[in-house]
Image: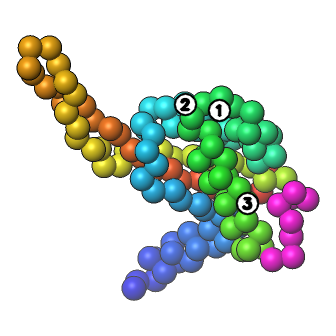
Amino acid sequence: MGARKKIAADKRKEAMKSVAIAKLHDVPTSPRKMRQVADIIRGVEVEKALAILRFSTRHASKPMEKLLVSAMHNWEAKNDGQKASDTKLVVRTVMVDESTSLKRMLPAPQGRAYRMKKRSNHVTIIVDKAE
């Protein structure tokens, strides 16, 4: 590895020390519905985001809440000795990516069949200290 690449890699590694990442794969909810929930909590403090998700009626809020709790625990594990409730954590990034789709057939009129796609997604949450 060259000197420039090593310096850049060290910078990235140092920046990632303070953040915690949690990922959830193959959530059986459409990416569009999950993105609507993700947009609500992006940039919000973790405690407030948990309250929003806990009292939301949307189907996608339950797995998102579990993932946010997991990200908090990951942050606590990375920064041993500190509690997530004592520090002011913020949801920095929420990414919702499309996953595989299950192709199913739907009965249609006159003996036909329509194709239906049951979509799923991958969710990534990055939690960091507020600045």
Dot 3, how many residues are within 10 Å of its Cα: few (below 14), some (14-19), or many (20+)? Answer: many
Q: Position of residue 78 (x, y in %)?
A: 72, 74
The answer to whether 64 is drawn above or below residue 104 in the figure is: below
> Dot 1 corresponds to which residue?
40
Disc nearer the start of the sequence (1/3): 1
Separation of marks 2 and 1 at Cα, in angstroms: 7 Å
Callouts 3 and 2 close, C-beta under 8 Å: no
Res. 11 visible in picture: no
At 27% across and 35% down in the image, what residue appears? 117
Residue in the foreground of this view, choosing between 29 and 46: 29
Q: Is residue 48 visible?
A: yes
Q: Which residue is mark 2?
A: 36
Q: Residue at x 51, y 56 (%)?
A: 24
Q: Please identify the quarter of the rendering in which residue 98 is found.
A: top left
User: Disc 3 or 2, which lies upstream in sequence?
Assistant: 2
Question: Which secondary structure type mostly characterizes the magenta part of the structure?
Answer: loop
Depth check: 44 or 50 in front? 50
- Answer left or right for 102 relative to 125: left
Q: Label for residue 69?
A: none
Q: Give the percent coordinates (x, y) of residue 22.
A: 59, 60
Q: Amino acid at mark 1?
A: Ile
- Residue at the extreme top of the image, as rendered: 110
Is residue 86 found inside the magenta-colored segment of the image?
yes
The secondary element bearing badge 1 is classed as: helix
Q: Label 3, on which residue? A: 72
Magenta region, residue range: 80-87
**Disc 1 residue crowd, few under 14, some 14–19, many 20+, Cα 10 Å:** few
State the residue lying farthest toward the right. Answer: 86
